[in-house]
Image (tube, grey):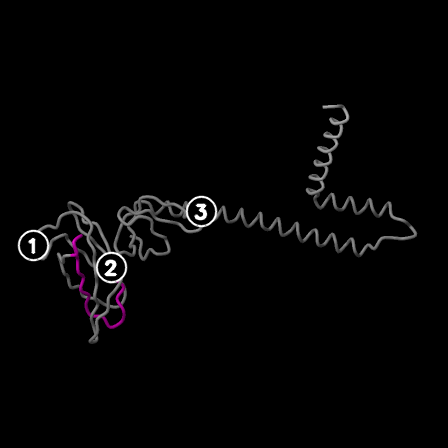
Amino acid sequence: MSSLDAVSALSGTAASSAAAARERLGQKDFIELMLAQFRNQDPLKPLDGTEFIGQLAQFSTVTGIEDMGTSLKSLADSLRSEQMLAGAALVGRQVLVPSSRAVLGEAGDVSGAVEAPEGVQQVLVTVRDAAGQIVRQMTVEAAEGLVDFRWDGITDAGRRAPPGNYSFGAIASGGGRSVSLPLMFNDQVRSVTLDTSGKQLLLNTTHHGPVQLADVRRIG
């Protein structure tokens, strides 16, 4: 490379750096440029100060919006951190989550609830195995609101059902009508995470996987 080429390359780099610097001019730089232009103006053709004041106001507005955006992002990050800390307090707790399935262990029972509408006198809960066969039907006295039920793991034949996944259905009756109800089951929170959007707190439960905090009906 010749000396002339080297000088040209350095000049191009300097020009690029200067252009980048101009793009990063702040409010202080803008005021200094404005004052310099006032000092060097043609006395016979004075510059319009009102125009400069308007430009400065616009510059301040843009700067303020950028600062506000930075502050809002910082606030959002802080709220996410607080949300995670609050969710951590739920680890190990029992929560009532919407589902039509539950897991029966080697020992113990399955507990859940339904939301009964007004006028319901009783709820029939049906338990089915993986093959869809009915293994237990239970009648639960009901009133308006949350109605708890519990399956002890014993089938209608009086034997202990094998451990595994079971599906449940609930039919509420009263006032000469019957209606199917959605079910909820108690599960334990193992950990908490934020979803991919970073907005929703997910409770990772033992048997029902990730559940949004907003879907939890009760915390035990």
The answer to whether the residues at label 2 and label 3 have Cβ atoms under 8 Å apart is no
Which residues lie in the magenta part? Answer: 113-132
Name the spot of residue 32 as percent of width and height, x first: 78, 44
Q: Which residue is mark 1?
A: 158
User: Looking at this rendering, what residue extends furthest in the top direction?
Assistant: 2
Q: Residue at x 33, y 45 (%)?
A: 91
Q: Give the SS element for disc 2.
A: strand
User: Looking at this rendering, what residue extends furthest in the front direction?
Assistant: 1
Q: Give the SS element for disc 1.
A: loop
Q: Residue at x 26, y 53 (%)?
A: 186
Res. 112 image quadrant: bottom left
Label 1 Cα neighbours within 10 Å, binned few <14 / some 14-19 / many ≥20: few
Q: Nearer the viewer, mark 2 or mark 3?
A: 2
Q: Nearer the viewer, mark 1 or mark 3?
A: 1
Q: Which residue is mark 2?
A: 113
Name the spot of residue 150 as percent of width and height, x first: 18, 56
Residue type highlighted by circle 2? Ala
User: Looking at this rendering, what residue extends furthest in the right direction?
Assistant: 44
Q: Which residue is mark 3?
A: 82
Label 3 Cα neighbours within 10 Å, binned few <14 / some 14-19 / many ≥20: few
- Which corner quadrant holds the N terminus? top right
Residue type highlighted by circle 3? Glu
Res. 29 image quadrant: top right
Q: Residue at x 33, y 46 (%)?
A: 204
Q: Which numbered disc flags the more N-terminal residue, 2 or 3?
A: 3
